[in-house]
Amino acid sequence: MRLVGGAAFVARTAEALQGGSSLALAAVGLAIAAGACLIAGFWTPIAGSVITVSALWFALTRAEDPLANVLLATIGATLALVGPGAWSIDARLFGWKRVDVRDRAR
């Protein structure tokens, strides 16, 4: 999910590089960097949060296909909350944490 979501976000955001003010270009550059971090699994909670905010901003400000941006925002928020997974830079640097849910024994 991290690879597909990050790649889709980078590809969708790269389309926004065509024209625009310098502030918009800086925001697009930050969004592409967050997508690249998400693909690598580096700073996943921060990258997922940036992707969520950026995708929602694109959904509200751009007329073409806002539902795709809402989907990308949902993927970014999910990855920010769930984490990067076992095969990521974050897992190598900080360790992979696993939560075991047990049945309640009576």
Image (cartoon, grey):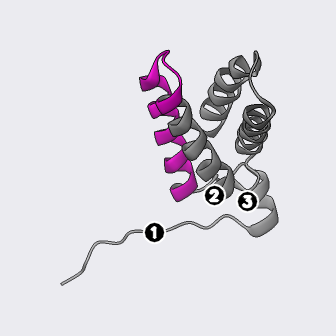
Observer-nearest of 22 and 46: 22
Q: Secondary structure at mark 3?
A: helix
- Image quadrant holding the C terminus, namely bottom left
* Circle 1 residue: 100
**Disc number at residue 45?**
2
Disc 3 to disc 2, C-alpha distance: 12 Å
Q: Residue at x 75, y 15 (%)?
A: 18
Q: Residue at x 80, y 60 (%)?
A: 92
Residue 1 can be seen in this image = no
Observer-nearest of 68 and 96: 68
The percent position of residue 74, horizontal first and vertical second, equals 46, 41
Observer-nearest of 34 and 29: 29
The percent position of residue 100, horizontal first and vertical second, equals 45, 69
Q: Residue at x 24, y 81 (%)?
A: 105
Check disc 3 and give the amino acid type.
Answer: Ala
Instruction: Find the magenta span and give its range.
Output: 60-81
The percent position of residue 36, horizontal first and vertical second, equals 77, 38
Check disc 1 and give the amino acid type.
Answer: Asp
Observer-nearest of 105 and 29: 29
- Image quadrant holding the N terminus, namely top right
Mark 3 vs 2, N-terminal side: 2
Mark in front: 2 vs 1: 2
Q: Residue at x 46, y 32 (%)?
A: 71
* Circle 3 residue: 91
Q: Are marks 2 and 1 in contact (CB under 8 Å)?
A: no
Mark in front: 1 vs 3: 3
